[in-house]
Amino acid sequence: MAVTGSQKSRLRLVVVQALVFSLFATLFVRLYYLQVVGGEGYQAQAADQSVRDIVVQPQRGLIVDDQGRPLVANRTSWVISIDRNLIDKLGERQRTELVRRVSVVVDQAPEDLEERLVTCGHEGSIRGTCWNGSPYQPVPVATDVGKDVALRVLEQPEDYPGVVAEQQNVRAYPRPFGVNLAHVLGYLSPITEDEFDAAQDADDQSLNGASSVGRAGIEKQYDEWLRGLPGYRRVAVDSMGRVLGDDSTIEATPGDTLVTSIDAKVQAVVEKALAERIKVQRQTFDDVSGRYYEADSGAAVVMEAKTGRIVAMASQPTYDPGVWVGGITEKELQHLYSEEAGTPLLSRATQGQFAPGSTWKPFMTAGALQNGYSTDTSLPCSSGFQVGNRVFKNYESGSYGSIGFAKALEVSCNTFFYRVGYNFWQKFGSDEADVNAKDPLVEKAKTFGFGSRTGIDVPGEAPGRIADRQWKRDYYESMKDYYCGLADKPQTAETSDFVYKFAREFCIEGYAYRAGDAVNFSIGQGDTIVTPLQLARAYAALSNGGTLWQPTVAKAVVSPSGEVLRRIRPVRSGNVDVPRKYLDYIDAALQNVSRVGTMAWKLVGFPLDDVKIRAKTGSAEVYGKQSTGWVASYTEDYVVVMMISQGGTGSGSTGDAVREIWETLYGVDGETVKPDAAAIPGVVAPDTLPTFLRDGSILPPVKETK
């Protein structure tokens, strides 16, 4: 039977109704699943999407001296930040005008602000400038601004929409007794992208994209203890990302306090004395060079002889450690690296490397006495000693006749030690090309720790250099192409006769360890270099019976509540293996240096019977420069080492300053030790720490009489 048109229409309507019904049924089932079956999960996700975490940076831990005096603390600083979530909602013209307005008030270029607002990793981000933190957190664009700037932003919110002015904690330097201590303390700077990624991979909760981390000094070495744990402020936001209000807060945990062995009183005296002596030497005429002393840099180290703890350590030139707070300018950074300014960022105490001069001789004495010489040995102290066609002169061509090791140390006779070095070279190493030849003096220098890092807990330490046969061979291999190339070319006006002649000789036999190298080594000249810290540690071994200590600045880590979390004990890193009888012999000779030798004129009237100072002076010569002056000294308690580069003779350049330091350490008043000498450093037991009270106050350690 034929289907009529009305029946076809009715059939289509039924099909459409069925389709609509099935669609509604599917939609109903889906809604039921979303709202009933999976409702709780989706509700949680929705709530999470409407809440954002804002990092609350912790207060960094204090750094204090051994008496509890703060060396590094914290202070509040006004910080201007921009909330990108809000300003991005503005029109392009309004946004540009706002950034311009902020740039004016914080005295920065608008393009610099724009660079800070870019999230690191995004297109256009600039390493070291971009923002590492949360995209929902206001981005700091100016730190340590004046209060007037902050008030301007706070009082005119209609002119600065999305701009936040708030106080944050930054590093402060209380400077007890006026101390500087920049090279020991170090500094902070913002975390890098690589460091942030590494922290994320390691699930390190103490670091976040807005963290500042230690970059040098003990700020870097003990950064994990000092940094604390960040807190989080959870804020509710609307669909446009605008903050509606606080949801919850997790308080930040302050960093731990680092107690050091530094004594601020002694540190202040050391810094002032070093700076003053450099100033004096720059006004002193050098008869040898015919000009005033350059006195371009200097360093001083005061160390506990029995533990290796650092009591004071100074370097010149120095800088204000506060220069890093709030971000350093390009001009300031260039100054710190500037050779013209003396490279202030370089710590001469741990990174400066200098020829030790005659301060080297006690260690050469130990090596000689253990390898065939005796305390009864007598050798000529002539005005000169000829090696080949060259005469190696005594200082100022002085002559003392035939003397022993003790007298040679007392008067600092070069030719005496030249003979010792030459004798060992003839006996064991006259084959100039033999890199494995025995050398007792080199071997003994290495046992005293020279040529390797001391392991001090201040990063960036230099290793020094023992210029032995192997070093000379390695140096030749690395430089022969350069010098041979220079020697093959015709001499030009830019190439001096000395350089041209040196290049030719070096090209032919620069690998050879000659007799001249051996005699130079014996008096701390030539290519051997040491750091002031290495020299201090070696002299501590002479004082304490032969133990090499690993120098340390930190003594303990204390929690914010005052609990001692970690004690940093002295660490023995070696022994010089010198018999006690030889150490006593050297010790007696160095006492005579202070009483009647090269240091005696600087210690006239000092109570040497009460404070038995042993000393050795040194004047190291470097081609093309003025002499570097050294004084290395010690008692049973302390070691004091000071040097001034291009400053003249050892005692002449630093002797007065070294005396002043000893007077401070032992409470010397004129020619006597003060009755209240118990107030001086050294009387506090090594394990005694300051007391940290819950109210934040710090009490000094309980004094104990020795």
Image: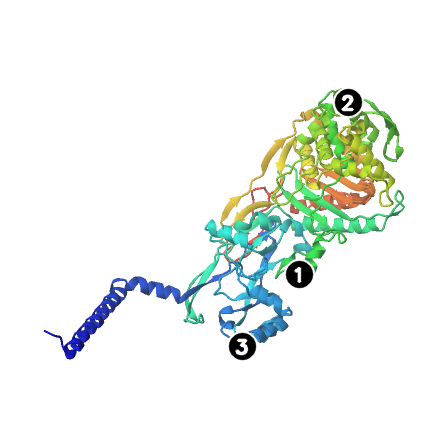
What amino acid type should be assigned to the residue bearing mark 3? Answer: Pro
What number is the disc on residue 430? 2
Q: Residue at x 75, y 43 (%)?
A: 643
User: What colouring method underlies this structural image?
Assistant: rainbow
CA distance separating discs 1 and 3: 29 Å
Give me the C-alpha separation between circle 2 and circle 3. Answer: 84 Å
Whole-Å distance between the Cαs marked 2 and 1?
A: 56 Å
User: In the rendering, at what x and y percent does residue 115 appear?
Assistant: 59, 64
In depth, the one of 484 and 23 nearer the eye is 23
Q: Residue at x 86, y 32 (%)?
A: 394
Q: Quadrant of the N terminus?
A: bottom left
Left or right of residue 88, residue 600 in this image: right
Vertical relation: 106 (above or below) 309 = below
Which one is earlier in the sequence, the residue at label 1 or at label 3?
3
Where residue 143 sits, quadrant-wise, is bottom right
* First in residue order: circle 2 vs circle 1: 1
Q: Quadrant of residue 301?
A: top right
Residue 373 — which label? none
- Write down the residue under mark 1: 329
Helix, strand or loop at mark 3? loop
Q: In the rendered image, which residue does mark 3 sit on? A: 157
Give the SS element for disc 1: loop
Q: Earlier in the sequence, mark 2 or mark 3?
A: 3
Tell me, yes or no, if residue 64 can be seen here: yes
Q: Give the class, few, some or many, for how many residues have Cα within 10 Å of label 3's Cα (few <14, many ≥20).
A: few
Question: Where does residue 170 sit, x and y in percent of width and height?
Answer: 58, 60
Q: Mark 2 belongs to which amino acid? A: Ser
Residue 605: percent from left, percent from top: 80, 41
| Image location (x, y in percent) of residue 671 | 77, 43
**Residue for point 64% across, 45% down:** 460
